[in-house]
Image (tube, grey):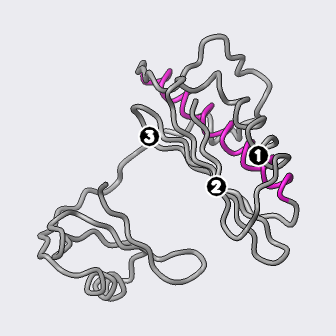
Amino acid sequence: MNIIISGKQLELTDGIKGAIEEKIERLDFYLHPETEVKVTVSAKKARQKIEVTIIPISGPIIRAEDIEENLYAAIDVVYDKLNKQLRRYKNRLQDKHQDNESIRFQGVDLSDEVDFDEDDENLEIVIERHKKFDMKPMSAEEAVLQMELIEHDFYMFRNVDTDELSIVYKRRNGGYGIIEHE
């Protein structure tokens, strides 16, 4: 597992890096050795934020973040979120009799470490609606206007500058974001 730790507006001490690595390495038995884990730590006044993104060789990207006054508490919360997500994903793979080489589950006891809500265990993904629509090339600004007009939280469009599919979305803290293919 390749752990990349970076700080924004914060000098990362060896203690902080060590605490992050210790927690993330506990997830090692879930992940393929070549999996990349990106950790970003930032601080604004008394709020400490940690974001962790697990980028597997194949399969879905797994992400968790938390904001706390105490960075070490935020690290613990993010670890718990990631552990729960990886377990849930593992259960879904087993239920569907699928395999994913990026997530390893040999020798993992799932019985007592994380309590699931009953709804989580029996969660089945049901796609309730399917939409198709024509995409005219437009700028990101035009896409945001379209998104606002249809009162959605996101909008997929063909970017006029790159001719690629992109998605604009409303951010929780205000403003907008854009997702583009790398």
The residue pinned by badge 2 equals 6
For the residue labelled by badge 2, is the local secondary structure a helix, a strand or a loop? strand
Viewer-nearest residue: 69 or 43: 43
- Tell me the residue that label 1 is attached to: 17
Report the mark closest to the observer, 2 or 3.
2
Q: Residue at x 41, y 34 (%)?
A: 59
* Residue 60 numbered mark, or none: 3
In three-dimensional space, the C-alpha distance between marks 1 and 2, rounded to whole angstroms, equals: 9 Å
- The residues tagged by marks 1 and 3 sit, at their Cα atoms, a distance apart of 26 Å
Q: Earlier in the sequence, mark 1 or mark 3?
A: 1
Give the Cα distance between marks 2 and 3: 22 Å
Amino acid at dot 2: Ser
Question: What secondary structure is marked by label 3?
Answer: loop
Nearest-to-viewer mark from 1 and 3: 1
Q: Secondary structure at mark 1?
A: helix
Q: Residue at x 67, y 30 (%)?
A: 27
**Quadrant of the image containing the C terminus:** bottom left
Task: In this rendered view, identify the residue nearer to me: 46 or 172.
Answer: 46
User: Disc 1, disc 3: CB below 8 Å?
Assistant: no
Residue at screen point 73% across, 38% down: 21
Report the magenta stretch's main SS.
Answer: helix
Placement of the N terminus among the 4 image quadrants: top right
Left or right placement of residue 12 versus residue 142 in this view: right
